[in-house]
Amino acid sequence: MAKEKYSILLPTYNERENLPIIIWLIVKYMQEAKINFEVIVIDDGSPDGTLDVAKQLQKIYGEDRILLRPRAAKLGLGTAYIHGIEHATGDYIIIMDADLSHHPKFIPQFVELQKKGGYDVVSGTRYKGTGGVYGWDFKRKLISRGANFLSQLLLRPNASDLTGSFRLYRKEVLKELISRCTSKGYVFQMEMIVRARQLNYTIGEVPISFVDRVYGQSKLGGSEIVQFAKNLLYLFATT
């Protein structure tokens, strides 16, 4: 039987400084764990030269290992995943941020848990066991915790971290979930978990430490919080 393959989707926008480090870490931990993988970089027309850096990395690690699937403009996370899935040759898809807030050392744990429990989804959680958040100020932690608490209360998803974006999916499950999701941005990750529960997909959780981005700007502002509240109520009404 052929060895299972994992496709890691990395949507990027202005991640020139972070990309070489995250790719190096992915390759290191995947090779150490002897996991068959590919990385698909989906750059949304970054003006900072992220794509040029990705091309250099492709030369270093090989075209079978690093796939470049750029898009002309910033078109959002959901469509970046759809775009990535279309080019993925793996049986499983791993989604993570390229800004070093998600450490690739956790991926082998995701893979191990998935195999052991036969899960459809394995989600990284900041709010269980040894999970945690580093580099956030009190306000940001409060917003995140509050958003999570509210979501738990209204949606009862049986998952401890709804807004995280570090996950492993069976490819077919991810396709199905994306086709049913209507949210954009910050809430998209939450809806994915809620829909997964709705469709009786099984979800495993791995505690992760989340580190606030090292380089560049965080993308969460006041308008996102308002949007989040609106979407949360919409999900509550429709699920």
Image (cartoon, rainbow, N blue to C red):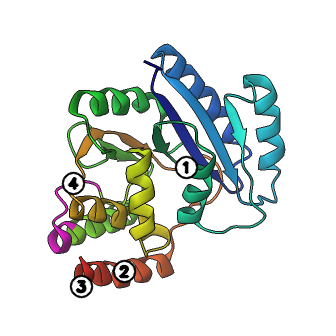
Instruction: Report how far apart the C-alphas of labels 4 and 1 lie in the structure.
Output: 24 Å
Q: Earlier in the sequence, mark 3 or mark 4?
A: 4
Residue type indicated by callout 4: Ala
Residue in view at x 60 percent, y 51 percent: 86
**Mark 3, other Cα within 10 Å: few <14 / some 14–19 / many ≥20:** few
**Mark 1, other Cα within 10 Å: few <14 / some 14–19 / many ≥20:** some
**Which residue carries the number 1 mark?**
213
The reply to whether discs 2 and 3 touch (Cβ–Cβ < 8 Å) is no
Of circles 1 and 2, which is in front?
2
Q: Regarding mark 4 in the picture, which secondary structure is present there?
A: loop
Query: Does 176 appear above or below 28?
Result: below
Which sits in the foreground, 135 or 77? 77
Residue type indicated by callout 3: Ala
Instruction: Report how far apart the C-alphas of labels 2 and 3 lie in the structure.
Output: 10 Å
Q: Is residue 153 magenta?
A: yes
Q: Regarding mark 2 in the picture, which secondary structure is present there?
A: helix
Residue 237, by quadrant, is bottom left
**Which residue carries the number 4 mark?**
159
Residue type indicated by callout 2: Asn
Instruction: Report how far apart the C-alphas of labels 3 and 1 lie in the structure.
Output: 33 Å
**Which residue carries the number 3 mark?**
237
Q: Regarding mark 3 in the picture, which secondary structure is present there?
A: helix
Residue 7, by quadrant, is top right
Of circles 2 and 3, which is in front?
3
Residue type indicated by callout 1: Arg
Q: How many numbered markers are drawn? A: 4
Instruction: Report how far apart the C-alphas of labels 3 and 4 lie in the structure.
Output: 19 Å
From which residue to which does the magenta span run?
152-161
**Which residue carries the number 2 mark?**
231
Instruction: Report how far apart the C-alphas of labels 2 and 4 lie in the structure.
Output: 18 Å
* Quarter occupied by the N terminus: top left
